[in-house]
Amino acid sequence: MANLANAPFWQVKSLSEMTASEWESLCDGCGKCCLHKLIDEDDPAETVHYTNVACRLLDCQTGRCSDYRQRFKSVPECVVIRPENVAELDYLPDSCAYRRLANGRSLPSWHPLRHNGSQEPMQAAGMSVAGRVVSETEAQVTTAAIVTWPLADCD
Ligand code: SF4
């Protein structure tokens, strides 16, 4: 029988049982959710297509929100991910920890929580948007901006 006494919180708690800090720590910082997406109105499957155009608050070089705490003042449409809504947010990438745990998966080998908070393995795995995207203040969200690399989801 497995000894769960020393197991990390994400293996023993449900999403709704996590503390606020545990929940926040699940975000790997990839920045993929900050990219604009397109859905073809004629596609019955409503497939989500990622673009390389990012929210105006995203720092495109670091891949992090430049005003996380105050972001709703300038981007009121930014969505707060919660245990209650994560199952509905089907535009989150498969690599996203919230989506993975909601789907019964575990955290990937490169997740910062498996590396004392370091994002280097996440970046080395090609998960970060840093340096790969442009701001919506400088580019149009068109089909020409569609990219497939945000769909990558190893292990
Ligand atoms: S896609 Fe998920 S893990 Fe990546 S930045 Fe957004 S919330 Fe965090």
Image (cartoon, grey):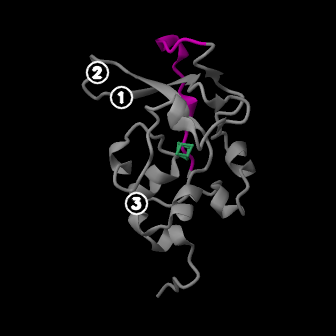
Numbered disc 2: secondary structure: loop
From the image, tell me which residue sits under label 3.
104
**Quadrant of the image where one finds ligand 1:** top right
Numbered disc 3: secondary structure: loop
- Mark 2 and mark 3 lie on one chain; the one further toward the N terminus is 2
The quadrant in which residue 44 appears is: top left
Front in this rendered view, residue 78 or 7:
78
Q: CA distance from mark 2 to mark 3?
A: 28 Å
Ligand 1 contact, mark 3 (Cβ < 8 Å)? no
Decide: marks 2, 1 in contact (CB < 8 A)?
yes
Find residue 43 and name its label: 2
Q: Is 55 left or right of 113, judged from the image as shown?
A: left
Q: Position of residue 63 (x, y in %)?
A: 67, 36
Find residue 38 and name its label: none
Q: Looking at the image, is 140 positioned above or below residue 76?
A: above
Q: Residue at x 45, y 45 (%)?
A: 80
Magenta stretch encompasses residue 120: no
Q: Position of residue 76 (x, y in %)?
A: 45, 32
Span shown in magenta: 139-154
- Give neighbour class at mark 2: few <14, some 14-19, many 20+ (Cα, 10 Å): few
Q: CA distance from mark 2 to mark 1?
A: 7 Å
Q: Amino acid at mark 3?
A: Gly
From the image, tell me which residue sits under label 1.
47
Q: CA distance from mark 3 to mark 1?
A: 22 Å
Q: Amino acid at mark 2?
A: Asp
Q: Position of residue 145 (x, y in %)?
A: 54, 16
Numbered disc 1: secondary structure: loop
Q: Residue at x 62, y 45 (%)?
A: 29
Front in this rendered view, residue 67 or 124:
67
The quadrant in which residue 40 appears is: top left
Q: Amino acid at mark 1?
A: Thr
- Mark 3 and mark 1 lie on one chain; the one further toward the N terminus is 1
